[in-house]
Amino acid sequence: MTDTSASPSSHAVADGPANASSVDRTDKLFTWFWQDGDSNWIPFRRSDQQPLEKAEASSSSFVNVEGGRWQVDLKERLVTDRYGSDPPRKPGKVRRALWFQQAATLIPYDEETSKAIEAAHERVWLGAKEALPKEDLEVAESVVLDSGRQVTLKLKYEQKSKSWKLSAKERSQGGSSWMEYAQGMLGKTYQLQRGFGPVDLQPGEEEEKALGDKVGNLIILVHGVGEKMWSEEGCGLAFSSVQFRQHTHVKQLQSAGFVQKGSGWEYPGEVPPPSLQKDEVLEASWWETIHTDEMDKRLARISLPSMKQVRQIANFAVVDALYYMQVGRKEAIVAAVARSVEAALARFLKHHPHHSGSIVLAGHSLGGAILFELLRSQTPKLSFAPGALFTMGSPTGLFLHVADSAPEESFALPGGTRFFNIFHPLDPVAYRIEPLIKEDLEKLEPAKVAVEGGIGGMKMHYGVQKMMNWATGEDKKQAEFSDLCQSVQLNAGDRIDWSLQEDLSIMTVAGVAGELVQALPSHACYMKSADVAAFVQSRTHSLAVARRLSSKTESSSDANRC
């Protein structure tokens, strides 16, 4: 039996009448939750709670949530993926909750049981005295549901301890034994709680609220090696895209002049804020193409039992790259990425048929190399020409080198797609592109990705280095090498290689051990990096503006000729 006691000031116990003066016990403080598979119940965004409750009251069938990417079917109590990712996320259960079991987290009771507890609670409450009784008091009520389930709620006041105890138990239909609520295998009991309380703001919620529902540019993310492992650990593309989207929206708001105030955003001054269209981030996955249950089981059988964590990384990361290098598999993987990108875009356009913003691709690790090969070979050919391709921590340069297929200076991606190669200086998987095209560009340092919040977009140590280069004349040499990029057409004469600003001086002390420690975090940092997201957003925006201006100029010229 769930038997809880608390002082009158405690809100952890199911609301006892001891503190009735401060709380209206007739309030129905419902909170909406969703469940992904067998994981914990997760509250919907704070901004989605009221629309869901209004729709429930009006008997509506569907409500769009999570910035429009998900949809809740109120009749079936399911949440589905409208266009957020490909393959679509599996439908999750939805629950409208009032009563909770207190364990490590609050666990909402199913709605039928919750109704039974609430009905019994109301009768118990109405039968109890508002003031503290002068002697021990016990009130109990039972409710029998249409299904035959019987719930009994007992409220007991102990004069000696000046405390209330709440217990609940249930007898299932046709059963003779009582099932105690929240009774664990070891007899552990938990508290009951009525009402969840305020829902915390979720990452990116306030940014999307400030930007509105209209979508501008579209960024399609493609994962790299080891996605099967990372997704099972809960830190795969689905997790990373949330962080990437939030950083992207923060950059949008800051660029438009919005300032953060508390947890929200506001536009300073007396003039109305500019009308913005949020950049949307979609996910495209390909790991399902090369990982089958049978292949994974066979790989597990031949793996040595020692160093399990290291071997797991090798099995699900290195093996992905080895599969890609096999004749026949490479073409299949490239085709799978193309299908996933097209499917993600098609599902988005189904709900945004008039979308006119730019579309760019961003690939992490091997995903970047696959996208480069897809755009270069045009096999299969995408239905659109991306405005840009961003590779992050990608071995694209290595694959081009191994295949002895270095691009010529005159080579450009079909359709005018621009190309940016972003990397962490300590990433062991990343390779440069510029020296592959033109040997002299090896002497040209990679361009630096601007730091959000840095002085002039530079971290302090790079700012000092820049001053030293100016004093020694090294900056003039770098400028001369930079001029050599103008003949390289892969990014229309602009820089291709872009490095994150990391202080490497520590590595002179840390040695080999330090390099090994930094290797994995350096390769996994990109999609959660505010600097990377801001770089992708700003470049996507500037290229989209340039294309619109170019299109208007061409249209004007054509009109004048007529």
Image (tube, rainbow, N blue to C red):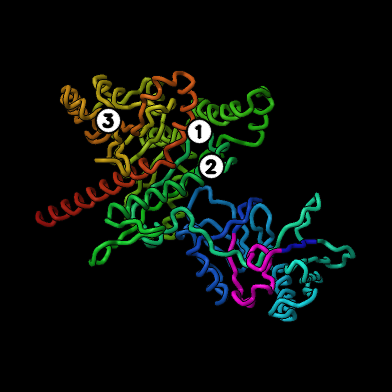
Taking the magenta stretch, the answer to whether it contains residue 13 is yes
Residue 38 percent across, percent down from the top left = 66, 51
Q: Is residue 361 above or below residue 440?
A: below
Q: State the residue position of label 1.
A: 225
Q: State the residue position of label 2.
A: 235
Amino acid under disc 2? Cys
Q: Secondary structure at mark 2?
A: loop
Q: Closer to the camera: disc 3 or disc 2?
A: 2
Which mark, by number, is residue 368? none
Amino acid under disc 1? Val
- Inspect this view and state whether residue 198 appears: yes
Q: Quadrant of residue 198?
A: bottom right
Q: Quadrant of the C terminus?
A: bottom left
Which range is magenta?
6-33
Q: State the residue position of label 3.
A: 411
Front residue of 160 and 432: 160
**Marked residue nearer the N-terminal end (3 or 1):** 1
Q: In the shown orientation, is residue 305 left or right of residue 378?
A: right
In whole angstroms, how far apart are the C-alphas of marks 3 and 2? Answer: 37 Å
